[in-house]
Image (cartoon, helix red, strand yellow):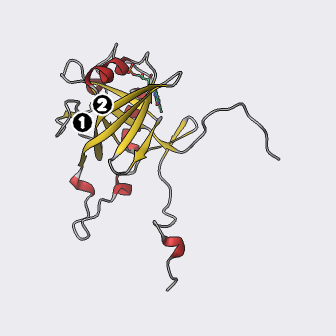
Amino acid sequence: MKQDWKPGTMIYPLPAILVSCGSTAEEYNLITVAWTGTLCTNPPMCYISVRPERHSYAIIKKNMEFVLNLTTEDMAFATDWCGVRSGRDYDKFEEMRLTPGKATIVSAPIVEESPLNIECRVKEIISLGSHDMFIAEVVNVRADERYLNPQTGKFELSESHPLVYLHGAYYGLGKKIGKFGWSVEKKQ
Ligand SMILES: Cc1cc2nc3c(=O)[nH]c(=O)nc-3n(C[C@H](O)[C@H](O)[C@H](O)COP(=O)(O)O)c2cc1C
């Protein structure tokens, strides 16, 4: 038997990412975001949806740039904390001992502890209701060489132990089931 529930978005699991913003050290801030995703491969485009009352909202709107910093199990505490405390009251980088680093293209800082930093430039802001959607173009990606396999050259993101967000709780990744296209591969 199935129940009907009132409409709501329950597209889980999702990443819980740290979005960094600000163009000067005084302005730098971090906001945890789960309402994020890919919009287009080429040009590479993505979105984040942010409530206008967030401290980060005005910073992102002013600079029209931000960085998506993927998070790991080791970063779970900081990811949650940055999602329940405001940059109005805290220097989140300092409180969480996270290191702001220089991005290659945008003025927003990267989080050095993150395995992958996705530098974004906002193209459009769409007001949807509770949240505004920032549609952005990816202008650069910084990848931690620690996860580059020297033999294959492949970026082994799973080895960073990505953080997974599911219906209000954080998890690790779980076991590998298959790989892209594996369902149609010939059995040996
Ligand atoms: C797991 C998690 C996911 C979140 N996702 C979003 C989101 O997608 N959009 C949003 O506006 N706030 C989201 N939040 C809430 C903000 O991160 C939170 O309000 C934060 O304190 C805002 O910081 P700021 O005021 O420094 O910008 C999320 C919080 C958590 C813990």
Q: Nearer the viewer, residue 109 or 172?
A: 109
Instruction: Please indicate whether residue 46 sits to the left or right of residue 95 in the image.
Output: right
Q: Is residue 72 above or below residue 188?
A: above
Structural distance between the alpha carbons of marks 2 and 1: 7 Å
In the image, residue 131 above or below residue 104: above
Residue 135 lies in quadrant: top left
Position in image of residue 153 (x %, y %): 24, 65
Picture coordinates of residue 46, whole percent (x, y):
38, 41
* Ligand 1 visible in quadrant: top left
Residue at image position (36%, 39%) is 75
Residue in front for this viewpoint, 49 or 164: 49
Q: Is disc 2 surrounded by few (<14), some (14 to 19) or many (20+) residues within 10 Å? A: many
Q: Is residue 94 above or below residue 136?
A: above
Tag 1, which secondary structure? strand
Residue 100 location (% of width, % of height):
21, 32
- Tag 1 residue: 110
Which residue is identified by label 2? 20
Q: Going 16% across and 35% down the picture, which residue do you hit?
A: 102
Figure check: 11 above or below 125: below
The answer to the question of whether label 2 and label 1 lie on touching residues, with beta carbons closer than 8 A, is: yes
- Apparent side of residue 143 relative to residue 58 in the rendered image (left or right): left
Task: Check disc 2 and give the amino acid type.
Answer: Ser
* Residue 129 shown left or right of residue 80 in the figure: right
